[in-house]
Image (cartoon, coloured by chain):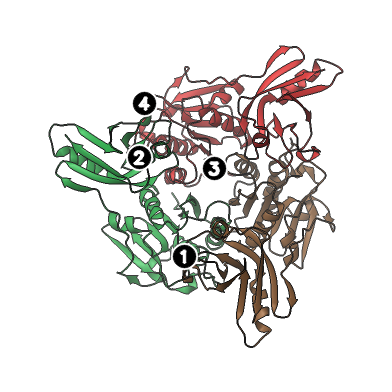
Chain colours: A green, B red, C brown
């Protein structure tokens, strides 16, 4: 089977302005054969942490060799570096402002390249749209098979934002927090499937309690298993503990926000 | 001309989360040659009836052999079946919750297949995202020419939601209702072009009256024919009677909602 | 390198209804090899001026031979003409209501063709969706290499909306206005890079003042150069003077609207 390269786009551009479309125009001008997929253009404006979570939760769900471009970039035009991160299976392109923090956390082997070779950029560049002038053309050239080392030097200092794992104040207690609210109002927490397994393994017997907003929350297998309109929890499709209201909006109905704490314990 | 398969996506995922993009990643991992078209990701959350209307109004506007994937699926993870509907010209894939009701109503010949052959699903599956784990890969394999019978057994019991036609209390009177409000605030009713023709044929003379919200509404050929800012009607591009305000928003300005009644009569 | 044709779509359809997707279905039914790029479907409803600005700022950022389809078309179904504009490098397709005004202003050589050859349209046509019935199929046939002259006769009278350049009340003063508010709340003005260069050239010395809302605004090179939360200006990536608040929303925070005036002078 012929290899057809894929480039994904994750930005805070919104859908009103033609910026995402323009990036695609630039890409197709360099490599007309590439497939371009919108991951989202609705990252909250300037929210680098949210962009880091979106790409961190999504990048491995694409075929190997996929090139992910992330543009949430309030520092565009300043001295912050344009970079490419090369993991074993993926390439990621964007500003060095922490958007790739989860990639750094999850991968043991990766290289970070400072993009400096200007002949791979657009000839006429602005100071406000590196997505068009640098990231799109570099992604397109990369998709044509140019080796990542051709775009600049490897660097060892780069921005990594803290994305703390849940704390474990006792051997049978986990303390996590809400990291993202999705379109349905579900609250995604930083408690992972592995954390829950570990907690369970601490006691051969006992019941798992989940506490949020002073209430005990039951753990379900799927949404429609919830028998009432209260808060429930499940392990979601990305491997995160998620708080939901069946056919409701947990965030709006129970005033849940990013940063709210959640406790788990075996009792 | 070489056949390039097309897959469309209709979901209630919104555009903020990367779920639609992830489904595309899964599809392209199986069949990189397929064309993927977003029909909409903005079906109102959990609104199976609205999804049924969107796909019912759209599916025939695509080339033959198009594969339509519909994911408005509050019952994901439960016992509700994943299915494929095969009509003469199209394949449709989604949950058995009624999203394909209009397809059943419009087609005399079709088969419904219960998707059970798990080797066509993703190997690691969640309980909350059949769009990624079942529907996307089945669509991709179908687009590669795998026969629909390979995915599971035909079933004869499946969910069909009532989408009533207008009633005809007298030979010269139609009673319909609003079934959808579009982006422009236009109110689309369940009165079809055929219904209007039939009503007209009942009398060789007489005038057609359309009554809504206690007002008589004139029937126009196109939007800008409306000479004032009141309610007007026309037969829209999908063959439905539609209520509109020229350069206005009928739903917002006249408080029109899904379920509101509309009358038509020859007087 | 094989030429792969590109068609872009710019509409006011929104993302809730399947209209943009349906246009793609029609295009792919005629030319399955074409690449289709959404520029935006979020032009403000019926806002022909805004559509004219979006396409005017974007069309040249695509590879040569790109075909741009623009559908903001409150007059659909009436006597307003469907047209194709052919410039040296691009084709543009849409209604003759002024959406191509900036193209006319910027290009010395172009032809406007009245689309009349109905065998290039869909066979069954509506009175409300020329995007599907006329513009999409004409774009698809054009992308297959059919010469533009085959679609109809050239016309010399067509709608051109006024998009005034900044006025120059004195040799050292420019008066412009806000023409567009973007997703970030940045206010894009009709003052171009060339205007600023000309103003600067009028005096060998002196300082450039930008005045808006009674305040002096400093000119920056890039967003994060702004040292406070007040209004600042820069020359944006499209070559327009843009007013912004760093990590803020200039339009919302300072009540800036389309039509607001801005002054520039050398003092």
Lateral position of residue C101 relative to residue A46, left or right: right
CA gap between label 2 and label 1 equals 32 Å
**Quarter occupied by residue B198:** top right
Q: Which residue is mark 1?
A: A138
Q: Whole-percent x and y of residue B132? A: 41, 39
Q: Whole-percent x and y of residue B82? A: 43, 28
Residue placed at 67% from the left, 74% from the top?
C195
The outermost residue toward the bottom is: C204
Residue C155 vertical position relative to residue A128 in the rendered view, above or below: above
Q: Which residue is mark 3?
A: B38
**Chain containing mark 1:** A
Q: Whole-percent x and y of residue B250? A: 68, 35
The outermost residue toward the top is: B170
Judging from the image, what secondary structure is the residue with disc 2 in?
loop
The outermost residue toward the front is: C214
The outermost residue toward the left is: A204
Which disc, if any, is residue A228?
4
**Chain containing mark 2:** A
Which disc, if any, is residue B1?
none
**In the image, which is nearer the foreground, mark 3 or mark 4?**
4
**In the image, which is nearer the foreground, mark 2 or mark 1?**
2
Lateral position of residue B49 relative to residue C192, left or right: left
Nearest the camera: A19 or C118? A19
């Amino acid at each position: 089977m012929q290899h057809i390269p894929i480039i994904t786009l994750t930005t805070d551009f919104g859908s009103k302005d033609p910026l995402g479309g323009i990036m695609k125009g630039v890409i197709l001008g360099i490599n007309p054969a590439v497939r371009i997929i919108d991951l989202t253009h609705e990252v909250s404006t300037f929210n680098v942490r949210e962009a880091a979570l979106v790409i961190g939760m999504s990048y491995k769900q694409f075929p190997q060799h996929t090139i992910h471009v992330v543009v949430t970039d309030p520092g565009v035009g300043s001295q912050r570096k344009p970079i490419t991160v090369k993991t074993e299976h993926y390439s990621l392109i964007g500003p060095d402002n922490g958007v790739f923090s989860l990639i750094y956390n999850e991968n043991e082997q990766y290289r970070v390249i400072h993009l400096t070779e200007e002949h791979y950029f657009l000839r006429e560049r602005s100071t406000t749209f590196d997505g068009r002038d640098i990231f799109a053309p570099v992604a397109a050239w990369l998709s044509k098979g140019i080796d990542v080392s051709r775009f600049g030097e490897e660097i060892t200092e780069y921005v990594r934002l803290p994305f703390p794992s849940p704390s474990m104040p006792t051997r049978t207690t986990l303390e996590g927090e809400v990291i993202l609210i999705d379109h349905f109002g579900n609250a995604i927490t930083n408690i992972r499937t592995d954390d829950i397994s570990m907690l369970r393994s601490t006691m051969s017997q006992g019941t798992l309690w989940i506490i949020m907003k002073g209430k005990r929350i039951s753990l379900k297998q799927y949404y429609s298993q919830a028998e009432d309109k209260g808060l429930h929890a499940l392990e979601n499709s990305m491997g995160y503990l998620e708080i939901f209201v069946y056919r409701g909006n947990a965030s709006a109905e129970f005033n849940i926000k990013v940063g709210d704490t959640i406790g788990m314990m075996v009792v």
